[in-house]
Amino acid sequence: MRATTARAQTPGRPALLQALLDAFRTPDLRARILFTLGMLVAFRLLAHVPVVNVDPALLANLFNRGDAQSELFGFLDLFSGGGLRNLSIVALGVYPYITASIVIQIMTPVIPRLQAMSKEGEAGRQRLNQITHYLMIPVAIAQAYAQLSLIQRLGGLPLGAFGGGFTLETMAVLLSLTAGTVFLVWLGELITERGIGNGVSIIIFGGIVAQFPTILGQGFLERNNLGGLLLLVAIGVAIVYLIVLFSEAQRRVPVQYGRSVFRGGRMYRQSGTSFLPLRVNSAGMIPLIFAFSIMILPATIASYFANPASASIGARIANFFTASLSPQGGVYWLFVFILVVLFTFFYTLVIFQQQNLAENLQKNGGFVPGIRPGKPTSDYINRIIVRITWGGALFLGFVAVLPYFATLVTDVRAIQLSSASLLIMVGVALDTMRQIEAQLLMRNYEGFLR
């Protein structure tokens, strides 16, 4: 009755606004939302606390060069929420944790011990999560040292700022950056437990949103190209629409459940029909992370050996990789498209293999009508997954390369659309809305989605 009453009191009020008001009227839900916002404020404060020996002018010049190295740091800066641009104590963001999570997910089907843990229910998941946290520490230290070395080599830090090797000052900075990552992951887990949404995703989301004022400021640099700027905004809105469409698209496989019930001294057979939702885009943004990381790596390594004035074979090869795999070239984006499609299939098949859908259906008395349980059901589901993944893979590849073509069409250079940013923002927003929706429905309120 409360839902009808709340909706009847404001018949002309938009559903989204009404849902937000309903959320803030509920004390415990309001506390969760405010707690999440408070954690994001703490994260943004830490993003402006730099480590020692930082020259903001040198860092700004490094990020604005427009070459492969600046593309690499811009990509990593995405996950640090702007912390890397300031070389703050949270400059690594949650990227080491994401890397460790991806490694554990990929290695689980390969390593029997990890595979056994994944089948132990909640206890097994907690142990896998603990292993992920342990793996995060060496990954963070290695990434911090690699970033500091590369930033200093490319002129983003004063000469001799961190010396050579593991000096006391270098160790202090490495520990600070690693501690910043651990602290952000802890904040994310607090948000997951006491707030709204997935905490790590919310941290990344908050970092992207915090960069909006900078993007708007860059838009004023293109005020003489108003037509191109408006076209870029229209393309951005269209991308968001497509991301929502493909994120929600799913193939619903009918599943029937049958069970026997003993009642009144007799055995009765009961059955029910449900659906197995298979998403078109099950991989999310992970293929983009893989593809951009691999494409940036060769040019970054080649930059150590490139020398335009040298005629040696090694220098020529390094110069070729540096020039050919530049983000300003079409070859770079062609390989990005191919890698995104390949990694989408790879990651999707790995994830569904871990879920063992056919086996779980058989254990719970479920079956697909017209398909025998066991291996025939597994083969049937795998065929469906491969077919619908083609749509998700081509869509992700299209979204990945669209920023390059948007820049060519609009001739807007100051603002760069980031496909990974849009995917993260839309995905996190949809997930958070679903959680608020569930909380409202538990309290008999009508939510965001109908």
Image (cartoon, rainbow, N blue to C red):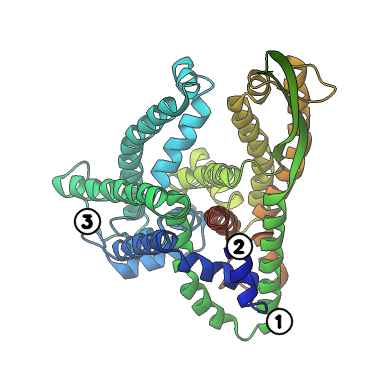
Q: Is tag 1's residue or tag 3's residue first in the polypeptide sequence?
A: 3
Residue 121: % across, % down: 47, 25
> Residue at the spot x=52%, y=42% of the render?
298
Q: Amino acid at mark 3?
A: Ala
Quarter of the image holding residue 60?
bottom left
Q: Is residue 256 visible?
A: no
Q: Is residue 37 above or below residue 351?
A: below
Q: Which residue is mark 2?
A: 1
Asked if residue 159 lies left or right of residue 99, the reply is left
Q: Are marks 3 and 2 in contact (CB under 8 Å)?
A: no
Q: Quadrant of the C terminus?
A: bottom right
Mark 2 residue type: Met
Tag 1 secondary structure: helix
Question: Does residue 14 show up?
Answer: yes
Using the numbered discs, state the Cα–Cα distance from disc 3 to disc 2 in whole angstroms. Answer: 66 Å
| Quarter of the image that includes the N terminus | bottom right
Q: Which residue is mark 1?
A: 227
Q: How many numbered marks, from 0 up?
A: 3
**Residue at the spot 61% in from the left edge and 62% down from the top edge:** 446
- Foreground disc of the pair 3, 2: 2
Please, what is the three-letter code of the amino acid marked with disc 1? Gly
Question: How far across and down, in percent of the image, does residue 166 sit?
Answer: 20, 41
The numbered mark, 3 or 2, whose residue comes first in the sequence reads 2
Q: Residue at x 73, y 36 (%)?
A: 275
User: Crowding at label 2, few (<14), some or many (≥20) Cα neighbours within 10 Å?
Assistant: few
The residue singled out by tag 3 in the image is: 161
Q: Residue 230 at x, y = what percent?
A: 68, 78
